[in-house]
């Protein structure tokens, strides 16, 4: 494997702006995702994969056919095209710097880098090319998918299982070297819409109902469990957006917890707060829109231990100690798992995702490629009975 192949690919992908948008109303949500999808479609063709398809909703599918007559597991590799809308992904200028003897790829500091998840894409492409160039490495069918709009929670909305017939898959969308995850938050979003009554402040006694102060009351009630004070398996309420006037205000929260009972308690609590506001200030003061987003995939993965065992075996075979940790966020793998495709999450190597300080060690990116190759080898060592 040429060391510069995956690096060159990754840097080429980062130059394409693929920031997703929650407000565009289209799918994919931004045109840059089409540009990267078409590039990948062409590169997959050049590598020599089969059943290559670019769907009308911007999903790229391909298949690396088995080169064995044995009945081997059919596995899949998945990564997403878009980058987070939290930080600009326009005009990314990726560069390689050396820090304490380690080569790192980073942006120029004015944008994110896009290792989430273009590092995953680059690793998949390079692993496919390597396996094509080394046909003596036995493997079963390997299905590939690159999905749009993962960052805004729409990455599996139009996923086509007719093009992706794996027994299980891996999202290559994790962080640091060795990271392996098969559980994630249960997730919901809560949107409070608050209605006040505005009058002239000089004549407001007994008349004014300030929606901003009611919003502040809600914020205080939800301030004990916040991301800034949460780690491990502890959940939180995360205030992501707020706006308003005296007459009307909005609060947008994310609700997260690994434990299903605690997750349900958190949802009941926000409903309790909304009911309390209406009792205190009058019916109709607070409208709550509470929606589930995704579930903890651990309950599914416990039924498919082979997928996790092979991932650990592959890492150890190339000298990596698996770092099993929960995903303190969401992943397409969680939604796919509940749609019938078990899907643990593997490291791609990036650090400080969704920020201008994002970077990826070159060595971690190279190890991500080797890990995928090792997974293909280890899966072939576990033929179906």
Image (cartoon, rainbow, N blue to C red):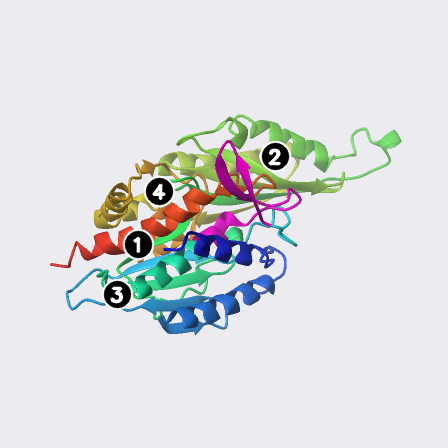
Q: Disc 1 on helix, strand or loop? A: helix
Q: CA distance from mark 1 to mark 3?
A: 12 Å
Give the label, 1 or 3, closer to the camera: 3
Q: Is residue 237 left or right of residue 77?
A: right
Closer to us: 347 or 193: 347
Q: Disc 2 on helix, strand or loop? A: helix
Q: Which class describes the residues within 10 Å of circle 3: few (<14), some (14-19), or many (20+)?
A: few
Q: CA distance from mark 3 to mark 4?
A: 30 Å
Q: Which label sits on residue 277? A: 2
Residue receiving disc 4? 181
Residue receiving disc 1? 373
Residue receiving disc 3? 135
- The percent position of residue 321, horizontal first and vertical second, equals 30, 36
Quadrant location of the C terminus in the rendered image: bottom left
Q: Which label sits on residue 274? A: none
Q: Which class describes the residues within 10 Å of circle 4: few (<14), some (14-19), or many (20+)?
A: many
Q: CA distance from mark 4 to mark 1?
A: 19 Å
Q: CA distance from mark 2 to mark 1?
A: 56 Å
Read off the magenta span. Answer: 94-120
Comes first in the chain, label 1 or label 3? 3
Give the label, 4 or 1, closer to the camera: 1
Q: Disc 4 on helix, strand or loop? A: strand
Residue ID at (55%, 67%): 34
Quadrant location of the N terminus in the rendered image: bottom left
- The percent position of residue 177, horizontal first and vertical second, equals 39, 40
Closer to us: 31 or 6: 6
Farthest residue, direction left: 385
Q: Disc 3 on helix, strand or loop? A: loop
- The percent position of residue 11, horizontal first and vertical second, equals 54, 54
């Amino acid at each position: 494997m040429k060391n510069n192949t995956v690096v060159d690919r990754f840097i080429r992908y980062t130059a394409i702006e693929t920031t997703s948008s929650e407000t565009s109303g289209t799918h994919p949500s931004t045109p840059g995702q089409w540009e990267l999808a078409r590039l990948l479609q062409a590169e997959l063709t050049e590598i020599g994969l089969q059943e290559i398809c670019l769907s009308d909703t911007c999903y790229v599918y391909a298949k690396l056919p088995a080169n064995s007559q044995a009945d081997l597991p059919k596995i899949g590799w998945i990564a997403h095209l878009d980058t987070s809308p939290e930080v600009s992904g326009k005009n990314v200028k990726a560069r390689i710097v050396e820090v304490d003897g380690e080569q790192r790829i980073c942006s120029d500091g004015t944008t994110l880098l896009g290792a989430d998840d273009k590092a995953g894409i680059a690793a998949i492409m390079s692993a496919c090319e390597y396996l094509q160039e080394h046909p003596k490495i036995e493997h079963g069918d390997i299905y590939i998918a690159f999905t749009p709009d993962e960052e805004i929670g729409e990455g599996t909305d139009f996923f086509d299982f007719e093009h992706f017939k794996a027994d299980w898959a891996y999202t290559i969308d994790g962080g640091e070297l060795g990271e392996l995850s098969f559980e994630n938050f249960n997730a919901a979003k809560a949107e409070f819409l608050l209605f006040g009554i505005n009058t002239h402040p000089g004549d407001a006694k007994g008349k004014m109902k300030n929606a901003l102060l009611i919003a502040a009351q809600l914020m205080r009630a939800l301030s004990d469990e916040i991301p800034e004070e949460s780690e491990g398996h502890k959940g939180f309420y995360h205030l992501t957006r707020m706006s308003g006037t005296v007459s009307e205000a909005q609060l947008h929260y994310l609700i997260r917890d690994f434990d299903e009972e605690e997750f349900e308690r958190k949802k009941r609590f926000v409903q309790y707060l909304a009911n309390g506001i209406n009792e205190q200030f009058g019916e109709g003061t607070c409208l709550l829109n509470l929606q589930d987003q995704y579930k903890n995939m651990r309950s599914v993965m416990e039924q498919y231990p082979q997928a996790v065992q092979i991932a650990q075996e592959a890492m150890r075979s190339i000298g990596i100690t698996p770092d099993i940790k929960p995903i303190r966020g969401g992943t397409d793998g969680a939604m796919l798992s509940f749609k019938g495709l078990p899907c643990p999450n593997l490291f791609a190597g990036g650090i400080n995702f969704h920020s201008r300080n994002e970077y990826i060690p070159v060595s971690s990116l190279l190890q991500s490629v080797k890990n995928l190759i090792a997974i293909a080898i280890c899966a072939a060592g576990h033929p179906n009975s």
